Image (cartoon, rainbow, N blue to C red):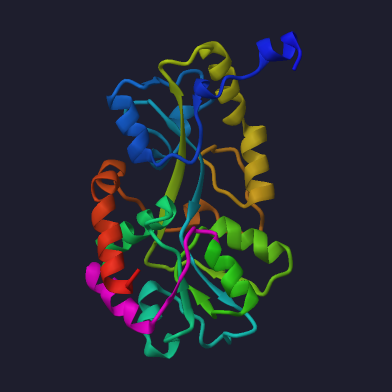
Amino acid sequence: MSRRSERTRIDPRALRLPGVRAGRARGGREEGRQGRLVHVPGPAEFPAGFKDRDGYYYGLRATVNVIAYNTKLVSAGEVPKGWKDLLDPKWKGKLVTAHPGYSGVIATHVLALVHLHGWDYFKQLAQNRLMLVQSAVDPAGVVASGERSVAVNGGDYYYYQMKKKGNPIEVVYPKEGVPLVVSPTAIASFAPHPNAAKLFTDFTFSRELQQVMADSEGLYTGHPEVKYPSDKPKLSELKLLTVDAEELEKRNEEIKNRFIEFFGA
């Protein structure tokens, strides 16, 4: 590596990159590990779910948990329209779920549905003998291959990508609501090059980059000027189920333990 490239290399400590749960981002703020985000284009116009109430982080991107099914295995008349439709015994042995112990996206999903339907929902769901996988993107491959007919959760963006590649997948956005999961970005208070961090953050929140995430990845963003593909609903068209970031962090062990209690692993 040349001396020049070494001097201009972005230090990874300059940013708290996406993928950290909002609860942990707030925890870092309280422990003094982050500085306040500044110079982010239009942060005041971002929806409430896309920004920390004290301005320490903003959501770079988001997904929602949805139901997905294999169009070759599930007829139009059988498609589950809501979360409770998955409790029907006809789905026994035909469902797949990701695990909250491996995925913050799924931990958010579980807590949101606990708020909506209570823990009894998951107790009943477990009676349908679900296949267990790990991350929030894993169910898509299982459904696409036909190993299981329906996924009971998972990030909609990955199903969208799989469908664009020609896989027999369709997505259902339940009318009673879809759990929103936002990936936050913040600047660390100990960043050795804070100005570079601010410039890079400005770039990541620009309309141009946010539009790329929507177009190529199927992700949602908080930028008010982003346009979404015609075959994907806008966030404003969905009923969003949000969970408090601090509650999610505090109840993380409970979520994992209750899930294991019901599903056996």
Magenta range is: 118-137
Q: Nearer the viewer, residue 252 or 222?
A: 252
Q: Quadrant of the C terminus?
A: bottom left
Residue 83, picture quadrant = bottom left
Give the percent coordinates (x, y) of residue 106: 41, 58
Residue 264, picture quadrant = bottom left
Q: Residue lying at the far front in this picture: please name it.
A: 1
**Magenta-drawn stretch contains 2:** no
Give the percent coordinates (x, y) of residue 58: 45, 32
- The residue lying at 45 percent from left, 64 percent from top is 98
**Magenta-drawn stretch contains 122:** yes
Q: Horizontal placement of 117 versus 238: left or right? A: left
Q: Horizontal placement of 107 versus 13: left or right? A: left
Residue 86, picture quadrant = bottom left
Q: Residue lying at the far right in this picture: please name it.
A: 2
Vertical arrangement, residue 50 with respect to residue 248, above or below = above
